[in-house]
Structure formats: C-alpha cells, structure tokens
Image: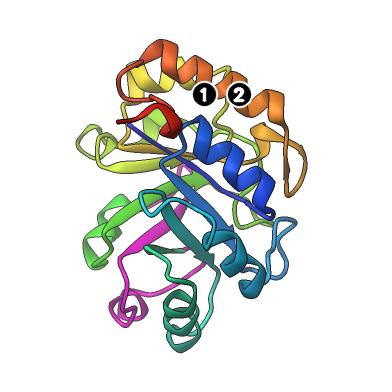
C-alpha cells in the first residue's frame, strides 16, 4: 500500500513528508481550496524533490488544455481530476489520470467502466467541498473486487490506518487534514507519528526515503 500526502503548499512540508516515507505528494490547483497553491510555487517545490517521489497535480473542472500545459510545465507524474470530469475529458489528458469520485450510498459504481483513468480515488461525498473534509465514508460500500485497486481518501488518519490496512487493503491512501496544524500547513509531530505507525505495521514497505538503498 502506497501513501500520498495531499495539500502541499510549502517546501518544508514537502521535504518532511518525503523524508518520512510518502510515496506521492499532491499539489492542489483549485483556487477555492483552502490548500490552493500557485503552479509557479509548486514548480519551485518540485525542483527540490527526489525523482522517485510521485508529483500529483489536483484539478477541479479545469480545461484539458490548462491541465496538460500545467502538468507539462511542472513535470508532474500524474494528474488527479477531482470534479465532475466526463469520460471524454479524461481521454483528452496527456498524462496518467487519477479520477476521483465522492462516495455516498447512491454512487453508481458501474460508471467507472466508462473512464480510461489509470487509477480511481474514492473520497467522502460533500455538497460543499471537493475533498479535504476530514470525514470518512462507509467503506463497506466499496465492492470487494475494487478495494485492492483504488486510492482511499476521506478522513484517513493514525486512528484508522490499521483498520484500513487489515480490512480495506487499498492500493494507496490519500490524506491531508489529519496531518495538519491548519489548512495547508503540516504538523511535524503528526506527520512523524503517522509514518512511524505505518512503519510499525509494515516496516519493509515504509522505510523512509533517506534510509532506502
């Protein structure tokens, strides 16, 4: 299971999460987000990161041209589409795509077959926010055949990561608010405690970048 830390807004947090063992870092280019970062600022941060760290750009209902241009200029590895993007729009992106869906009891899982995305991310449904709610959804809604193929988001924290690893077993988890001291700013202690918990659960898979050979 991989770990993506989203809502990176500054170099200090990026380097902290990378050194503790984050596999991917997410930069949010949605201007209404509390964790919005300007593309030029994200580019400056990315230039200091390891080539082995996945750089993810998060977009909400932007045009394919803007997404493709931004991803190219910033040397992103993958783009995350977190709005109401259609299958046709996904097919027009020139980079690997994580297509996000906000899950509730009415979600139509068969619709996933229409999308050519590389990965699907399941987050908590909200009428007012595109992610970052800090709330979980009912994981039992996820079809068993999808659990090992998805990125799980929404309220992921040190308090439930053991349950997630044991019972959901997603391909990756995506977290942000549970590691913050305030929106857009990570808490050093929370980050370290979370990754220490991960290392204790799966020590070989979560060896910090600085210790990898």
Which corner quadrant holds the C terminus? top left
Provide the residue designation for mark 2. Answer: 192
In the image: residue 151, left or right of residue 195: left
Mark 1 surroundings: few (<14), some (14-19) or many (≥20) residues within 10 A: many
Reply above or below: 106 against 144: below
Depth check: 152 or 185 in front? 185
Residue 206 sits in quarter: top left
Q: Which segment did they paint magenta?
A: 81-107
Asked if the stretch drawn in magenta spans residue 99, the answer is yes
Does residue 14 appear anywhere in the picture? Answer: yes
Q: Which residue is located at x 50 percent, y 64 percent? A: 57
Q: Are marks 1 and 2 in contact (CB under 8 Å)?
A: yes
**Residue 195: which numbered mark, if any?**
1
- Real-space CA distance between mark 1 and mark 2, rounded to the nearest whole angstrom: 5 Å
Identify the residue at the far top of this view.
200
Point out residue 203 in the picture as x, y percentages from the top left corner.
35, 15
């Amino acid at each position: 299971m991989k770990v993506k830390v989203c809502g990176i807004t500054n170099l200090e947090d990026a380097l902290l999460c990378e050194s503790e063992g984050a596999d991917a870092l997410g930069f949010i280019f949605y201007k209404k987000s509390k964790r919005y970062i300007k593309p030029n600022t994200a580019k400056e941060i990315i230039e200091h990161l390891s080539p082995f760290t996945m750089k993810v750009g998060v977009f909400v209902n932007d045009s394919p041209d803007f997404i493709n241009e931004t991803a190219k200029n910033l040397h992103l590895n993958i783009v995350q589409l977190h709005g109401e993007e259609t299958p046709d729009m996904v097919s027009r992106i020139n980079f690997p795509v994580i297509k996000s869906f906000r899950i509730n009891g009415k979600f139509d899982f068969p619709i996933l077959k229409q999308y050519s995305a590389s990965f699907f991310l399941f987050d908590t449904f909200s009428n007012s926010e595109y992610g970052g709610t800090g709330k979980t959804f009912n994981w039992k809604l996820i079809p068993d055949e999808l659990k090992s193929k998805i990125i799980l988001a929404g309220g992921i924290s040190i308090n439930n990561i053991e349950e997630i690893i044991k019972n959901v077993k997603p391909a990756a988890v995506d977290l942000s608010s549970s590691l913050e001291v305030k929106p857009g700013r990570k808490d050093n202690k929370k980050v370290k405690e979370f990754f220490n918990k991960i290392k204790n659960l799966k020590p070989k898979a979560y060896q910090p970048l600085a210790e990898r050979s």
